[in-house]
Amino acid sequence: MFITKSNREYHREIKVMEHEFDMRTQDIRFETALKFERQLNTRRNIVNKINVKLGGINYEVESPTRIIIGLETSQNSTMRDGLICVGFSAKIGFFKLPFQKCKDFVVLRRF
């Protein structure tokens, strides 16, 4: 991720390096980065754009009678420490009530 001032024109160079090194990049203007903490839409737009670049899909499921659960695991590439992190998130909706969100993670030792 690059955060650059508007009066600097690095975008072209960043994109050239992105293709040359086959590496995903995100160029964010400094002025936009300043809005990140206080403006929900700015935050949402940046996160959604990064998610798509990393191969994710942005969508929202609205089904009041279903529970939707996402699971993710992460571990050290060498696996020497034997630790694995398991994370989950769920969006739960019951009938006419608003969706409830729950999320957590746990770090476990492989056995």
Image (cartoon, rainbow, N blue to C red):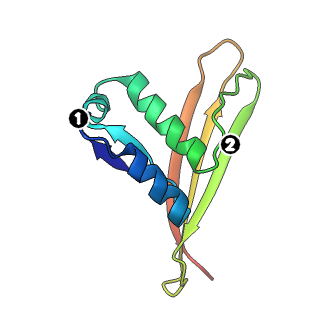
State the residue position of label 2: 69
Residue 66's tag is none
Q: Determine crowd level at label 1: few under 14, some 14-19, many 20+ residues with C-alpha closer than 10 A.
A: few
The numbered mark, 2 or 1, whose residue comes first in the sequence reads: 1
Q: Is residue 45 left or right of residue 111?
A: left
Q: Nearer the viewer, residue 96 or 69?
A: 69
Q: In this view, does 78 lie above or below 57?
A: below
Residue 22 picture location, percent across and down: 56, 62
Secondary structure under tag 2 reads strand
State the residue position of label 1: 7
Residue 88 picture location, percent across and down: 59, 50
What amino acid is labelled 2 in the image? Answer: Ile
Residue 52 picture location, percent across and down: 59, 42
Q: Determine crowd level at label 2: few under 14, some 14-19, many 20+ residues with C-alpha closer than 10 A.
A: few
Residue depicted at x 42% and y 23%: 41
Q: Is residue 35 above or below residue 24?
A: above
Quarter holding the C terminus? bottom right
Say which quarter of the image contains residue 4.
top left
What amino acid is labelled 1 in the image? Answer: Asn
